[in-house]
Image: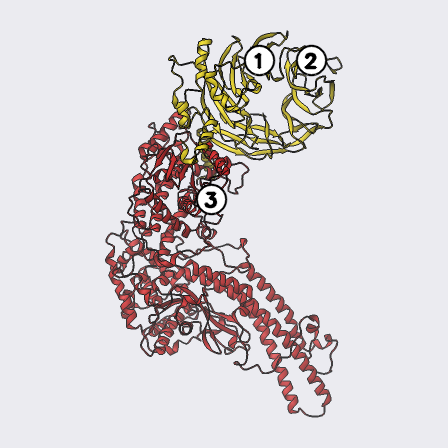
Chain colours: A red, B yellow
Amino acid sequence: MIGSPDVVAFTKEDDFGQADPDPWAIPEEFSVPLSPISDSNPWAKTSYAKFTKDFILISEFSEQVGPQPLLTIPEDPKVCGTFDLNYFSLRIMSVDYQASFVGHPPGSGYPRLSFVEDSRVVLGDSKEGAFAYVHHLTLYDLEARGFVRPFCMAYVSADERKIMLQFQELSLRFSQASECLKAGNRRAFAKELQRKLRDLEYTHSVLQREEGLQREAGTQRMYSAHAVEKANELANVEKSIYEHRDLLRQISSYNKRPRRDPQAVSCQRCINECLIECEQLIDKYAKLARPFSYNDKDETGQAIDAGGDEEGDDEGVKRRPSYTPQLIKAKSAKCFDKRLKTLPELCDVTFYDATVTLLKDTEKGFRGDLCYLHTQRLDKALRRKQRVTNFLFEEDLGDDDEEDERGTLRPFCAVNHAVDNDTPLNPPHIVLGTEPLVLDDLEPPDPLNPGHTSETEPGLVESHLESSPSDQTLETQGSSEGNKGSFSSDKSGLDLAEKQLNRAKSQAPDPDCELTNEPDMERESSSEDLETTAGDDDGDGTPVSLLEVVSELEASREDECEVITDGASDILIPLDSACCMAQEGFLYEASPAERTPCVGQSSNSQSPVVNQEPQALLPLQNDYTVGSPGSESPATGLELPVGLLGDAVSRTSLEEGSDCTMSASTGSDRAASPLGYGGVVTLRQRKKAGQGALKFVRQYPFAMQALWCLLSGRTLVVLGADEGRVRRLVSALALFVPAPGKCGERVQAWLSCPFTLTDLQRWKLIGLQRVASPVGSSMLYSLSRYSRYISILDVDQKTLRCPPYRGQLLANIADHRTSIRRGSTFFLHLQSTLCEMAAKAFLLTFTHHLHLPVSCTEGPEGVEGRRRCFLQGQLGLGHQDSQILLYLSQLVTQHYLQPATGGSAAATSFTFNYTTSVLYKI
Amino acid sequence: MLRWILGGREAQGSLEKSSMLCIGEEQPKNWFTELQVLKGHFDIVRFLVQIDDFRCASAGDDGLVLVWNVETGERLQELRGHSQQITAMTTFTCDDGDTTHTSLLTASSDRSLSLWDPDTGNRVQTISDLQSSVKCLLVLERLCVFVSGGGELCVWNKDFQLQCHRPNHSDTGITALIELPKNCIAAAMDKEIVIYRLTVSTDSSISVAEVRCLSDHQDRIRALINVNDGLFASGSHAGELILWDAIEWNIMAYEHILWEESPACTHAEIRLAAPKPSEMSIQHLTTNGRHILAAVGSGLYVFSVLTKTVVAYRKAAHDSNVLHTMLLSDSELMSCSEDGSVRMWEIQDLPLSAEPASSGFFGMWTFGRANKPSAPPLKKVVDVPNIRMLELTGDLIGHSGAVQMFVSFRENGLVTCSTDHLLILWKNGERQSQLRSLALFQKLEENEGL
């Protein structure tokens, strides 16, 4: 079974359960999972892996040379380092669950294509320090043995937890890739069949002619050996034609077959096109049946002989002069003589390329450690909640996120049959292990009273979630009609699980029922396969651990004893858990953390992480219309949860800012275009800018004033002679520009000509070159002319000319004695503060009575007073701090009013006020 | 003061010289706190015409006429047709019984006249190949005709049919036209004002006859306006302001603005530009019936119609020639100038003490010499006991070229046009934000939530 080194590693995870004494201190869905081994370096585990980054490996079980790696994504050889890909391919391919069936099933005349569903497993190699999500798939190849070529795609990581917790999403992505490959493969296969049929047809006609001639020549003689041979050959060809025709029919029926794999969604149009193509082919070759019948004799006008039983039909050949059919030798080449098709050939290059692109995206999407992925997702989830204010300080959320949010999954399509393709489907939400749930592991909820406290709720939900998907995702073999019972479970010996299997079989004597339960048993059996394989392979006692596949299975099964699942067809057989208690319990205890990933599937489309409202924000988002306008006091009617909000945000900020857990590999690798050149500002750039901002804040005592200018909408001009210095400062300060635009349109990093009012309207932050020349004086003229609209930060002389600011709001982020040392930490700190401001601005914007009179008798002064009272009394902001919020609120309003299509003819307006400026010096 | 920006002594000097009168950055009475830059013209924009409460048309040297929505800043129509610069533009409202429809009448240097429908952007009527280009237009709504002045005086009906015309006898041609009672019109031609009378005969044909020629001005007449039913006023290049009786065509008042000042007070200005006739040229006249506001050189001059005396004046109101003025009320006025700024003024009683305006008005750059510009009113107190002072209450800085003209839409804002090819829409930021909030909640209601 599982070797000791792995066991040690897993049992250690027991300890971390106590690490979190108060699980409700932080809303659990926003907590960052602690490192599983809390008392040691979280990166220690990965240290002995021989590769530096996670990568995707595609391998094939070649019938000629055995398992071999085909390619890795990324293709950089450095990624794999000294990691032995060949060895690992052998590992992952040796757990091929699909047990691809070969040859003629008994009782059927023709060879059958096995329609095999993909299988998904997680396995690990503790010696190599490698863990992998392995996705097996089979592709069809006419020349291959049994017409199938087994492949697998593996996501290889050093962090096993990462794989386990991302299982659902990995599975989803790889299913997409697999579907894409298979779709291409079916087309290619159909084409190949077509070609083969033509060849056969041609061969057939030639043979017939020969036979006819022969018969004419030697009618008197009895059948010579030669003639017999020819006749046999002809018969063979005929048989072959029948077989291939049948194959064609089978491949075309592929899509009509009900899919068991819920994630196997493919583009409907692709399917239809393929289907139509195949049907046309079938129609075409259906004619071929007729030459073998008697009445066809009349049709074939150019029959060479008379009296032949069967007659060649050259019609097909004549119809398609473009293709020169070839004679097919009676005996196929030996399997080692032929060259096997490569993967691109197998799948049609378009589809192959699309798949590789998809996998590359997948690899990019999963970069970084678990913690990073988790925070990133939390961040995304939060941002999705704040669509109205996101444009202020957050990066743009991509389209795919919108897709996620809509809860639909677009099947991946290589040829971009995009729009009409949306299938409403609930993609699995990714839930990372949340620590509080560990409690459930430690004290399992009372099965009789599952919902007694709120504490058990997560467990309840989890088990619901877990039970239904586990049997789907781990389904290892969707059966074709013909290969039932063909799996090789028999050899797995006398294991306990085998007993289970037998028991299961005996419990389900009904064939229908057996069919339903087949996936389970297959999985069961295949897991045995794996284990035995592992044992067989590893003489040195290092096992390939079949990680949590089993344990999760068991766990879910145990849950099932408590919770009645509702998936009627997918229901697991309630096994007698007592008989395998020892093993089960062991595994179960060994991996408490892995239990927690509750993978939302059909039963619950709402993942706890993504969809639960941050508690503090709830009242904000819901109450904006309420505002009890009837009340007399200007500020009443708004029980503002300031404290709550503030707390939540500051907590987040504390949490985020306290430690910077981003590992080195976490950076996004989007094109690093310098700010201000129209490229999309990436997170990486923003973090880098965080360093600059921190430097600025520490270096300049008047940083706060400068930030206030930016946040209150006053254009800041950074004046300096040195371009690099100005650019750096501008990119640092760009973090504070509200609504900078997708590509930083409101920021101009370097300008060396005088600016005009239009520029001021467009840009909120300008880097300006100081030149000592006539050009310079005209530039300075424009500076002084528009001085009422701008603040000027002189980099060379370290002065700032701007209206005086004495507020408190920015003291938090512009404290030059800050103890934050790292740029990315400071960036997170900033983000949380800015996020808080954005939330307040949202509140201000959408609170009705702060802008409009509550009764017809009330004048604008009343509204004004109420707004002031709100800002000062409830938000506790001074006049100048209020200006920030008012400006942000204006931006929110304008953004909201913008037509969704954009591109209004009207120019944007530019608001300012008339205040005196003062000069700050260091 | 700005040395830290300028980094050089000379630059500083020139800058301070140019900012002679500067209110500074603190302008509590200035409610234009939002602006929108309207782009569309390719050359100097010279004319602005208000079409209705929310639309205005702009025209200039590029021959384009653009119709703007003042509320949103949208460009509604682009009227193309003139191949050369526009020389005159006015609205033409014709009452056809129940509906009144406002059209735009434009004249251009390409010697054509066009009538446009600002709703559709169509050119309704056009006449080209006139003998001379039209310099001014006057619509007589009562007769439903319009008069074009230039090399000759022509009367057209609304269908662009020439009713009658009179050739001109001076070289400069007609530069301004106003309507007078009893079907008379006054045309400014060089130094003279010629009074014509229009006669509508029974077959509704119109004839025009010269009735009188008033040649009391010593120099070219630059401005000619109606003051009220009984008075009209004219201003000349030499600074003569004459108030005429509209019926008898007699001189009611004569004021020669010479900017008589003591040398001590003017030395600052003298250094800038030597006294030229243009310094006292009356560029523009405007009135609200009670006061006449004259733009004299770079100064402003308020003349009371009732008392026929000077109410207030400021010689150095702008750094350069004032091009357009407006009386917002009896005490508030606005002016724009070649120096690129629009300034708002208030006619205030002099403070009781002899202390001139506080240095607080004159922002941080000029307070070193703050009392110098305020010297002239101080001196005037001695001469004219009733004089009040023009106090700068705010300025609008945005254009980088001369501000040619502006049109006020009251609380909806102000549109300015300039030689820098731009129009700027100045608005009350607070009001706009209120309107936006209103729109926001409306949209919210339509969308039924966020």
Quarter holding residue A4: bottom left
Please, what secondary structure does the residue beneath circle 3 have?
strand
For mark 2, give the secondary structure.
strand
Residue drawn at x 43%, y 75% is A487
Quadrant assignment, res B252: top right
Amino acid tagged 2: Tyr
Quadrant housing the C terminus of chain A? top left
The residue depicted at 50 percent of the width and 18 percent of the height is B315
Residue A811: x and y, percent? Answer: 31, 40
Reading the image, the residue beneath label 1 is: B241
Q: In front: B348, or B339?
A: B339
Viewer-closest of A46 and B175: B175
| Mark 3 lies on residue | A750
Q: CA distance from mark 2 to mark 1?
A: 22 Å
Decide if residue A717 is on the left or right side of residue B324: left
Q: Is residue B322 visible?
A: yes
Q: Position of residue A503 (x, y in %)?
A: 34, 72
Residue B378 location in percent, x, y?
Answer: 43, 14
For the residues bearing labels 2 and 3, Cβ distance under 8 angstroms:
no
Q: Nearer the viewer, residue A533 or A882?
A: A882
Give, as a three-letter code, the residue at label 3: Trp
Give the answer, above or below, for where A745 lies relative to A310.
above
Subunit under mark 3:
A
Q: Residues within 10 Å of mark 2 (few under 14, many from 20)?
A: many
Relative to A824, A248 lies left or right: right
Q: Circle 1 sits in a helix, a strand or a loop, which is it? A: strand
**Residue picked out by circle 2:** B196
Q: CA distance from mark 3 to mark 1?
A: 53 Å
